[in-house]
Image: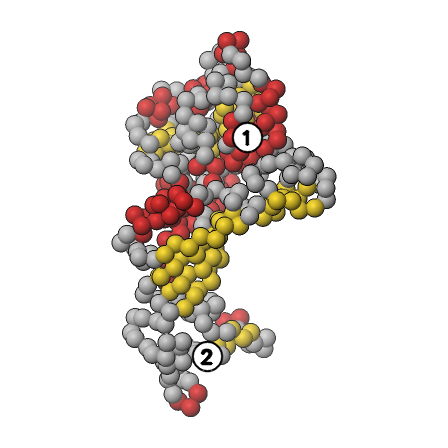
Amino acid sequence: MCTVCGCGTSTIVEDPGAGHARAHIHDEHDHHHAHEDGIIDFSKGPAGVHVPGLSPERVISVERDILSKNDAFANANRARFEKDRILALNLVSSPGSGKTSLLVAAICALRDRWPIAVIEGDQQTSRDAERIRATGAPAIQINTGKGCHLDAHMVGHAAEHLGLAPGGLLFIENVGNLVCPAAFDLGEAHKVVVLSVTEGEDKPLKYPDMFAAADLMLLNKSDLLPHLDFDVGACIAAAARVNPRLEILLISARTGEGLPAFTAWIEARAAAMAMP
Amino acid sequence: MHEVSLLEGIIGLVEDERLKQDFARVSTIRLRLGRLGHAEPDALRFCFDAVARGTIAEGATLDIEMIAGEGWCTQCCRTMPLAELYGACPACGHAPLRITAGNDLRLAELEVA
């Protein structure tokens, strides 16, 4: 394809002798219409006719990743976070796993040492953002309406509104959904998947995309384990099968068990990010 | 239903193409989807007409080519068919295989006029 006018039909012949600005020649047309023998011929297309605004039927090879638009926004977000040395974490899970409770507990443990901001994603209501704001951290709520996930464009807008402090932490709490958010890069440094022990140990095998995309798994509600038949070993084995590099922490937002390990995991990465 | 978002992305790519190439109408949108990928072809077909209404893609046919899943088994040292993401090798049971095909999510071609 010609990268000057975007035409998809002409062959581009590189002219090694020419400078970069005029480095190719069109064999079928050029941009100033000084054609062979002084004739401008529009009948050379497959249909043999030219109608203004219409071009003959043809096949265009596109070959682009369907998520490329989202990925471009995600890369812009990531570049911005890196420039401002902000550690962005994307928390994903099914609804009700305890993401917001974990965030509230983590923010309370970290707020004296790091500037923290939160982007909350839900289909509707601003209940989660209100819970976060009660900790003193600024939060912005994105309501996705019928949408089942946050995308990088939404996060870019929210980050602008939040006015993030350089060298801080940004928590993005995704819409509760163990399927769709796996496909959409938001520009985060890490995805953190939360699984609660009331959900069943085989979830990593049933919803593998999310566990494969994550770098850390928090196995939440550990305080309920004495009351359940949940097999922690089987759950860890299932997660390791899908993602052998996945780090796993047993945690309880309610009792605080495992919370220091989680905040240490965050701070190690935030400190590495903050280094010049 | 992230298929709606994927379709909006696809139509955005078609709009990009229209800015680069001179066409007024799209008759076919050809996708290449891996069987191990993120998108469900039936769900894409189900919502395509609704998402395409009022866009350059309205009235177009959605043609979906499915690519079979394959993975490299480090025990058998060969490529094996893979029916599910992170599934085991059908010959020796080793898991997980490294996916070598079937993860596609691509807009391949457009038929335009």
Within-10-Å neighbours for mark 1: few <14, some 14–19, many 20+: many
- Relative depth, front residue between A123 and A260: A123
Q: Amino acid at mark 2?
A: Glu
- Which chain is mark 1 on? A
- Relative depth, front residue between A79 and B88: B88
Instruction: Classify the position of the C terminus of chain A by image quarter.
Output: top right
Q: Name the residue located 40 percent from the left edge and 36 percent from the top edge.
A: A149
Q: Name the residue located 48 percent from the left edge and 37 percent from the top edge.
A: A182
Q: Which mark is residue A205?
A: 1
Q: Which mark is residue A28?
A: 2
- Which chain is mark 2 on? A
- Can residue A209 be seen here? The reply is yes
Q: Toward which corner of the image does residue A204 lie, by quadrant?
A: top right
Q: Name the residue located 46 percent from the left edge and 79 percent from the top edge.
A: A28
Within-10-Å neighbours for mark 2: few <14, some 14–19, many 20+: few
Give the secondary structure at mark 2. Answer: loop
Residue A13's place in the image compared with B98, above or below, is below
Residue A227's place in the image compared with A212, above or below, is above
Q: Amino acid at mark 1?
A: Leu
